[in-house]
Image (cartoon, grey):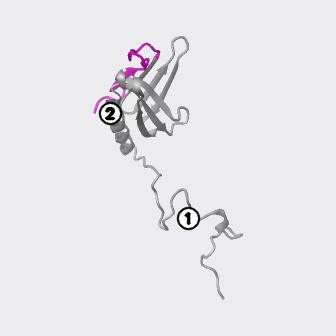
């Protein structure tokens, strides 16, 4: 595997017409981090750890298809960046596949699991918990537990 500080991928945001990189936004990715740099006079540099990206999707309108560019939407658990777009990049399908592989590799190496499909032993999903606050007694024990019978 390559050095984690060496960029694996780099591109610039392109204008929709003609797909030329006449903007001041650049994107780059290493094995562990995606970097977004924006601005000319006033600059902003954001980074998101790849294992924090939960889902990616590709969006392309007619003009983007005509000029061979696309936008990748990333759903992220990053506190500062949140969900974000990698806008108007060339070869968007290849970049999406590359990022998807890098993200999966990082999630496996960090042992990050998604909680979206976790089911407990009673068949309840995360959005339908097994116990609710109404299920508890005054002494904070669940109803139906072992009770002292004399």
Along the line of sight, the residue nearer the viewer: 9 or 1: 9
Q: How many other residues sit within 10 Å of disc 1, few (<14), some (14-19) or many (≥20)?
A: some
Looking at the magenta stretch, what is its main secondary structure?
loop
Residue 22 is at least partly visible in this image: yes
- Let me know if residue 53 is in the magenta part: no
Give residue 136's quadrant in the image. Answer: bottom right
Checking the image for residue 66, the label placed there is none
Give left or right: position of 3 versus 110.
left
Question: How far apart in space, not on screen, are marks 1 and 2 (Cα)?
Answer: 39 Å
Give left or right: position of 50 versus 124.
left
* Residue 114 pos. (x, y %): 44, 49
* Quarter occupied by the C terminus: bottom right
Q: Do the residues labelled 1 and 2 touch (CB within 8 Å)?
A: no
Q: What stretch is highlighted in magenta?
A: 1-24
> What residue sits 43% from the left and 49% below the top?
113
> What residue sits 34% from the left and 40% below the top?
105
Considering every residue shown, the one lying at the far right of the view is: 138
Q: Name the residue under label 1.
A: 130
| Tag 2 secondary structure | helix
Q: Is residue 16 above or below residue 135?
A: above
In this figure, what is the number of numbered marks? 2
Q: Mark 2 points at which residue?
A: 98
> What residue sits 42% from the left and 18% below the top?
14
> What residue sits 49% from the left and 32% below the top?
84
Residue 7 is at least partly visible in this image: no
Q: Which of marks 1 and 2 is nearer the N terminus?
A: 2
Along the line of sight, the residue nearer the viewer: 135 or 65: 65
């Amino acid at each position: 595997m390559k050095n984690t500080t060496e960029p694996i991928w780099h591109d610039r945001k392109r204008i929709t017409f003609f797909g030329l990189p006449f903007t001041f936004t650049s994107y780059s990715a290493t094995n562990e981090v995606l970097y977004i740099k924006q601005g000319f006079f006033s600059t902003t540099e954001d980074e998101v750890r790849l294992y924090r990206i939960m889902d990616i999707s590709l969006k392309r309108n007619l003009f983007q298809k005509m000029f061979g560019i696309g936008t990748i939407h990333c759903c992220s658990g990053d506190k500062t960046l949140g969900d974000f777009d990698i806008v108007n990049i060339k070869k968007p399908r290849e970049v999406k596949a590359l990022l998807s592989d890098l993200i999966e590799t990082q999630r496996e190496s960090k042992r990050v699991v998604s909680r979206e499909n976790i089911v407990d032993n009673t068949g309840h999903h995360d959005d339908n918990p097994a116990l609710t606050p109404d299920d508890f007694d005054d002494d904070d024990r669940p109803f139906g537990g072992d009770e002292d019978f004399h």
